[in-house]
Structure formats: C-alpha cells, structure tokens
Image (cartoon, rainbow, N blue to C red):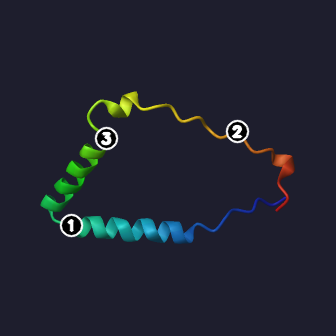
Amino acid sequence: MKQIYPDISDILAAKSKQRRTLVALSWEDKVAIVERMRALLPKGQWKNRPAVQPDPPLDASANTL
C-alpha cells in the first residue's frame, strides 16, 4: 500500500516567510525578542518544566485513509 503524506506546503511557506521576516530585523529588534522570550520563561525553568507525556502510537491497522 502506498504511503499517503499530508500536504504541509502551507506550513513550509509560513516558516519560510517567518525566516525572511526575522532576517530583515535589526540586531536591536532581535535582542528585544530574546529578552521577551527570557521574561516568559525565567532562567532555570526550562530544565525544571513539567514533562510532557508523548501521545500513544497510532495503530497502523486502524488507518482508513
């Protein structure tokens, strides 16, 4: 059976657009973004964040695409 992959071209296009937007920013704007990110997650909390439980694997035989 041939594997069918979802169309992710819109996701890739959005990522590319965001990269171009970030490249066009000044150094000061990039530093401001990093500072805002640091304020959202204070130092040390990245390692101490609660673990996310992974989703259980999908049953391949239940795939009805």
* Disc nearer the start of the sequence (3/2): 3
Residue position marked by numbered label 2 in the rendering: 56
Q: Nearer the viewer, mark 1 or mark 2?
A: 2
The quadrant of the image that shows the C terminus is: bottom right
Which of the labelled discs sits on residue 25, or is there none?
1
* Disc nearer the start of the sequence (3/1): 1
Q: Amino acid at mark 3?
A: Leu
63 horizontally vs 33: left or right: right
- SS state under label 1: loop
Question: Residue, x 82% and y 54% (percent of image)?
Answer: 63
Q: Quadrant of residue 47?
A: top left
Q: How many angstroms separate mark 3 from mark 1 (CA)?
A: 23 Å
Q: How many angstroms separate mark 1 from mark 2 (CA)?
A: 40 Å
Tell me residue 17's x, y (percent). Answer: 38, 71
Tell me residue 51's x, y (percent). Answer: 50, 31
Which of the labelled discs sits on residue 41, or is there none?
3
Dot 3 crowding, Cα within 10 Å, few <14, some 14–19, many 20+:
few
Q: How many angstroms separate mark 3 from mark 2 (CA)?
A: 28 Å
